[in-house]
Image (spheres, helix red, strand yellow):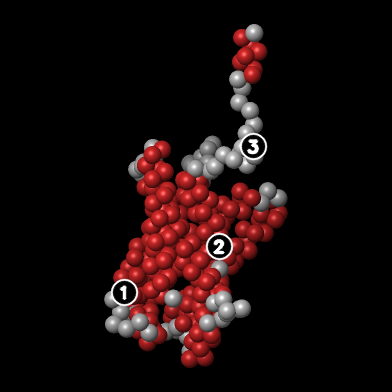
Amino acid sequence: MAQAAAVKARPKYLNVFLLGIMLPVPGFVSIFHRVSGAGLFLCMPLLIWLFGASLGTPEQFSAYRSAMEFSLLGLPLVKLLLLGLLWAYLHHFCAGIRFLLLDMHIGVDRAPARASAWAVFAVSLTLTVVLGGLTW
Amino acid sequence: MVKRLVVGAHYGFRDWLAQRVTAVVMAVYTVYMLVRIALLPAHDNEAWRTLMAGGFTKFVTFLFALALFYHAWVGIRDIWMDYVQQISLRLTLHVLTLLALVGYAGWVAQILWRL
């Protein structure tokens, strides 16, 4: 009997999606760190091109201006993409500082780790609104 | 005498450390440049050119770019290693990533030193 009970108590495979188990906030910070890094890498050619054109000859600078003003169906697509990349950079920045602190064993307990994960989202989104607003 | 570690993943430590050192370099540069831009007398293309044409700015911007490309190499390689299991495809992606990043470094150098 005791053996049967022990067998029954063994952990089962949990389908986290079916049971609606949420990834904890630090997990979201982590996956967003990877996604934002990948997005920034993929957009590097565009960013370097814009950087170079903003500092180039008058012809290149006018190409920079028209690229920045590019819009489709009334949506300024390049500017919106850059706003998204600004958020990606700021998230990657804030989450990176959090990871450096965790490396130094600062805030590794559950409560401070969750609080700092929320702080990463709050600070990066606020900075995106402020810097995006200033530069739009 | 050959000093060779044959056990454990010690070779990963250099990349782990490089990822952190390059991150700190980029973070310091980011704050420095935000301050420099905020302190510009005017926010137009002329002021932007003058800022980027400065010798020190060029030097630290190039260091930022190199830190960025090394950092991206470690991070993107981790992504390929996590999700691409087929070894020949993974090697191809590693090589393409490296070639792109080396090319970007040349591109940034050319942008900076023609100013």
Residue nearer the viewer, A74 or B43: A74
Which of these two is toward me, B87 or A32? A32
Q: Is residue B25 visible?
A: no
Q: Chain for mark 1?
A: B
Mark 3 falls within which chain?
A
Task: Provide the residue designation for mark 1.
Answer: B38
| Label of residue A15 in the image | 3
Q: How many marks?
A: 3
Q: Quadrant of residue A81?
A: bottom right
Query: Which residue reaches farthest bottom?
Result: A58
Distance of label 2 from label 1 (alpha carbons): 27 Å
**Which residue in the rendered view is the most extreme toward the top?**
A1
**To which residue does mark 2 refer?**
A39
Question: CB atoms at circles 2 and 1 under 8 Å apart?
Answer: no
Above or below residue A56? Residue A34 is above
Residue at (41, 75) in percent of width and height: A135
Please report the residue visible at 64 percent of the width from the left and 8 percent of the height from the top: A1
Give how far across and how far down residue A3 sits, in percent.
63, 11
Pinpoint residue A92: horizontal percent, then vertical percent.
46, 58
Residue drawn at point x = 51 percent, y = 75 percent: A79
Q: Secondary structure at mark 3?
A: loop
- For marks 2 and 3, the one nearer the N-term is 3
Label 2: how many residues lie within 10 Å, few (<14), some (14-19) or many (20+)?
Answer: some
Q: Is residue B46 left or right of residue B84?
A: left
- Position of the C terminus of chain A by quadrant: bottom left
